[in-house]
Amino acid sequence: MTSDEVLAVPVAELRPALEAVLMVADEPLDQRALASAVGYPEGEVADALAALAGEYDDQGRGFELRNVAGGWRFYTREEYAQVVESFVLDGQQARLTQAALETLAVVAYQQPVSRARVSAIRGVNVDGVMRTLVNRGLVEEAGQDGEHGATLYRTTSYFLERIGVVSLDELPELAPYLPDLEDMEDELASRAETPEVEPAPEVEPAPDAQPAPEGDA
């Protein structure tokens, strides 16, 4: 063995070490990564992970250790999901408004998309709503439009996590929720025959305006 070769030396008991690493992991970890982190052979790590998962099940803990797609991670046990959901939602002071949900849907299905494009689809200015979605971590910048230089936006991995899908490919198809083509053509024809007349804007009196004095002309 050369001086540059160093064996991983365990510095803690195996099971507590695995629990400590898994507790701070933000994504599933495979056995090799866990073995490297705790300094134990993969075989021992595999046995310890299976033993921990069994212990949590036997003890009826509120969480469980699962091996999903080759990676180990702590998950809330299904029967307690409603409790966790209630705790998380109850702490939110601001829920997404209908306008924010509609804007988020446009970004999800049209991404990457500019704010101007989203505004055109919704028919209203969405600058404030987009800022809210960015601040909530649901939408992020995705470069610039090569033609116009406008900033493009896309949904984040947090958005996928919140709606419970792995990728955008799992978003539901829009076709079943759209009106029939014939209905759309009738609607467009009706609008073409009857031009819309915008109501006159309301004019509020100036704060300092005083009523005209009554008297003879």
Image (cartoon, rainbow, N blue to C red):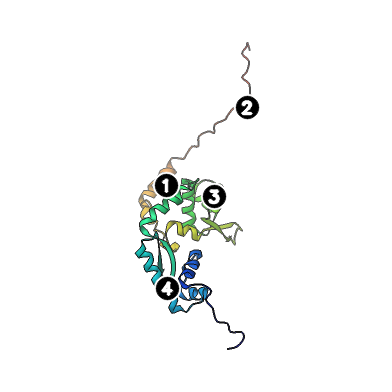
Q: Which residue is mark 4?
A: 48
Circle 1/circle 2 CB separation < 8 Å? no
Circle 2/circle 3 CB separation < 8 Å? no
Estimate how packed mark 1 is, as few (under 14), some (14 to 19) or many (20 or more) residues with alpha carbons within 10 Å.
few
Question: What amino acid type is highlighted by mark number 1?
Answer: Leu
Tell me the SS state at disc 3: helix
**Closer to the camera: disc 2 or disc 3?**
3
Q: Which residue is mark 3?
A: 132
Q: In the visual, does 98 lie left or right of 146?
A: left
Question: What amino acid type is highlighted by mark number 2?
Answer: Pro
Estimate how packed mark 3 is, as few (under 14), some (14 to 19) or many (20 or more) residues with alpha carbons within 10 Å.
some
**Closer to the camera: disc 2 or disc 4?**
4
Residue 38: x and y in percent read: 51, 73
Task: Indicate which disc, 3 or 1, sits on the residue closer to the N terminus.
Answer: 3
| Residue at far bottom of view | 1
Tell me the SS state at disc 1: helix
Disc 4 and disc 1: Cα gap in Å? 65 Å
Q: In the visual, does 99 lie left or right of 56?
A: right
Disc 2 and disc 4: Cα gap in Å? 75 Å
Instruction: Write the residue at 43% across / 56% down.
Output: 163
Question: What amino acid type is highlighted by mark number 4?
Answer: Ala
Estimate how packed mark 4 is, as few (under 14), some (14 to 19) or many (20 or more) residues with alpha carbons within 10 Å.
some
Instruction: Please name whichever residue, 157 or 175, is drawn nearer the observer in this view of the structure.
Output: 157
Instruction: Please name whichever residue, 170 or 106, is drawn nearer the observer in this view of the structure.
Output: 170
Residue 137: x and y in percent read: 53, 55
Tell me the SS state at disc 4: helix
